């Protein structure tokens, strides 16, 4: 097993919009997502660029921001079997920070085991379509653009074993108004991350799975589905390890998924940044997002904490305040999380909350060990 190495994870300036226009205007164009894995290399899903071999592909980074740039690209690898493609940027790459890509990402493999792991992906799905009223078309109507979606959630890694994909449980869009088009259309090709390593690419939204489930091809499956020549291309231009043995494996020995952990010994002066992960997990839960059920949870524990019932319009600052109050009264944070578990039941959101609690406890123990 490779040693754990420094990992930087998802870098938003390397997230690409992939735009394909078929040759001779045959059929509609296609949009997808991708990730820049080298100075001139962009990783994406093969089905996104299916029509690009005879047409034109473009990649865009940092759209409508000060550092926006767009370049033409060509397909150098496209495997329908593995649903992975590599684009070579053929147009000009701007100088400065954009010319200095800090090397390829670290690639990883999740275990074939009974674990639930946090994951994230960033792409440009259809439900993020917006109107830009500051930019009008010739007929006077506003132009449209797709904003980014930073999808965070959990993967229950034993799902989709026959298909050989990862099932990502993420926050769903509010509605599905187009029966013939998925609201997640355009998210395909987005890199999927766990603990700073690229573990797959979003490949499909199966409508029967519901709006909160995506499927992602696993990085380790590329070694089974690609030819030797195709793997060599990904190794040379995308930094993929030459063999599956070079992938970082999760979870490392001795750090597998655990049950609920006590937070009773946490210091009461932890900086807010230490609580950010747990706050993010909590604010994604329906029990916490609903002010009525949150007040019910708080009323079931210490009266001092119950007094922190939601008072501000924004939920996130409220939850930070609740956690800081709990830290001042040892044992109440454990009571809070247990009450949420009782109301939420067994869900990916609760698993993510527990994962963040475990990580918070580990960081605290490590910090104690340095004093």
Image (spheres, rainbow, N blue to C red):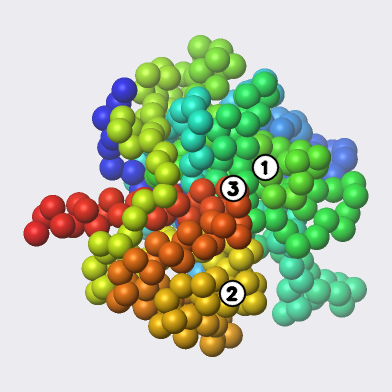
Residue sitting at 42 percent across and 49 percent down? 260
The answer to whether residue 157 is left or right of residue 105 is right
Secondary structure of the residue carrying tag 2 is helix
Dot 1 corresponds to which residue? 214
Give the mark nearer the N terminus: 3 vs 1.
1
Circle nearer the viewer, 2 or 3: 2
Question: Which residue is identified by label 3?
Answer: 346
Find residue 72 and report its image quarter. top right
Kindly check if marks 3 and 1 are in contact, taking CB atoms under 8 A apart as contact. no
Give the structural element (helix, strand or loop) at label 1.
strand
Could you classify mark 3 by the number of other residues whose Cα lies within 10 Å: few (under 14), some (14-19), or many (20 or more)? few
| Residue nearest the viewer, comparing 297 with 355 | 297
Which residue is located at x 37 percent, y 73 percent? 326
Q: Secondary structure at mark 3?
A: loop
Image quarter (top left, top right, bottom left or bottom right) of the C terminus? bottom left
Residue at 87 percent of width and 38 percent of height: 26
Which numbered circle lies on residue 355?
none
Mark 2 or mark 3, earlier in chain:
2
The answer to whether residue 327 is left or right of residue 52 is: left
Q: Is residue 157 above or below residue 329?
A: above
In the picture, residue 305 is in which quadrant?
A: bottom left
Taking 337 as reference, is 216 above or below it?
above
Residue 313: x %, y % from top left: 58, 85
Q: Residue 124, can we see it?
A: yes
Name the residue tied to disc 2.
296
- Quadrant of the image containing the N terminus: top left
Q: Pointers 2 and 1 in contact (CB under 8 A)? A: no
**Which is nearer the eye, 234 or 344?**
344
Neighbour class for label 1 at 10 Å: few (<14), some, many (≥20)? many
């Amino acid at each position: 097993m490779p040693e754990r190495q420094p990992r930087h994870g998802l870098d938003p300036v390397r997230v690409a919009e992939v735009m394909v226009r078929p040759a001779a205007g045959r059929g509609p164009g296609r949009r997808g997502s991708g990730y820049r894995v080298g100075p001139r290399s962009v990783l994406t899903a093969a089905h996104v660029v299916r029509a690009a071999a005879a047409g034109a592909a473009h990649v865009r980074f940092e759209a409508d921001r000060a550092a926006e740039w767009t370049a033409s690209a060509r397909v150098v690898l496209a495997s329908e079997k593995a649903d992975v493609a590599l684009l070579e940027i053929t147009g000009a790459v701007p100088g400065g920070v954009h010319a200095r890509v800090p090397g390829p990402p670290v690639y990883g493999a999740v275990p074939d085991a009974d674990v639930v792991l946090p994951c994230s992906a960033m792409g440009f799905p259809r439900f993020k379509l917006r109107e830009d009223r500051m930019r009008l078309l010739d007929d006077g109507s506003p132009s449209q653009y797709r904003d980014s979606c930073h999808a965070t959630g959990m993967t229950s890694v034993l799902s989709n074993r026959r298909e050989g994909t990862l099932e990502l449980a993420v926050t769903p869009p509010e509605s599905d108004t187009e029966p013939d088009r998925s609201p997640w259309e355009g998210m395909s090709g987005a890199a999927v991350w766990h603990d700073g390593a690229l573990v797959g690419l979003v490949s499909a939204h199966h409508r029967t799975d519901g709006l909160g489930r995506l499927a992602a091809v696993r990085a380790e499956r590329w070694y089974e589905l690609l030819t030797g020549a195709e793997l060599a291309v990904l190794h040379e231009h995308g930094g993929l390890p030459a063999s599956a043995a070079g992938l970082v494996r999760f979870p490392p020995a001795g750090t597998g998924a655990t049950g609920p952990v006590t937070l009773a010994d946490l210091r009461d002066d932890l900086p807010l940044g230490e609580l950010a992960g747990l706050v993010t997990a909590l604010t994604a839960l329906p029990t916490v997002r609903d002010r009525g059920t949150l007040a019910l949870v708080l009323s079931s524990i210490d009266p001092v904490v119950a007094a922190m019932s939601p008072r501000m319009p924004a939920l996130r600052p409220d939850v930070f305040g609740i956690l800081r109050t709990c830290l001042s009264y040892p044992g109440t944070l454990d009571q809070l999380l247990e009450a949420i578990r009782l109301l939420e039941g067994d869900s990916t959101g609760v698993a993510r909350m527990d994962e963040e609690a475990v990580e918070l406890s580990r960081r605290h123990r490590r910090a104690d060990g340095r004093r």
